[in-house]
Amino acid sequence: MENQELWDDIVSQMKNKLGPNAYNTWFKHSNLITVEEKKLVVQASNEFAADWIRKHYLHEIEKAAEKVFKRSMSITITNKNAKAYQQ
């Protein structure tokens, strides 16, 4: 499965809790850029969005990723202009 398909699956797990406004604001322009055995790197559109996602949605992403991958995954949120930020 491609990274974008995996990210779409993860986000769809959260859609009921997110709602359309949160999805369009924080997740529509984000991408899953790295998939490793127990680690995912998500790229947000900018540092503000990356920080907001870390503070408000990281736990939800972790739970959704665990459902998709059937195991606990470490999630790193970064942005297009910065190095990866490990939470």
Image: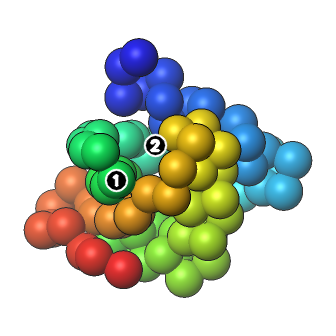
Quarter of the figure with the N terminus = top left
Question: How far separated are the C-alphas under marks 2 and 1?
Answer: 23 Å
Q: Quadrant of residue 70?
A: top right
Residue 11 spot, x, y in % from top left: 63, 42
In the displayed structure image, the side of residue 41 where residue 60 appears, left or right: right
Q: Nearer the viewer, residue 72 or 6?
A: 72
Q: Residue at x 73, y 42 (%)?
A: 13
Q: Is residue 61 above or below residue 59?
A: above
The residue indicated by pointer 1 is 38
Amino acid at the residue labelled 1? Lys
> Mark 1 falls on what kind of element?
loop
Residue 50 spot, x, y in % from top left: 40, 68
Amino acid at the residue labelled 2? His
Residue 58 spot, x, y in % from top left: 55, 70
In the displayed structure image, the side of residue 31 where residue 23 appears, left or right: right
Graded by Cα atoms within 10 Å as few (under 14), some (14 to 19) or many (20 or more), the crowding at tag 2 reads few
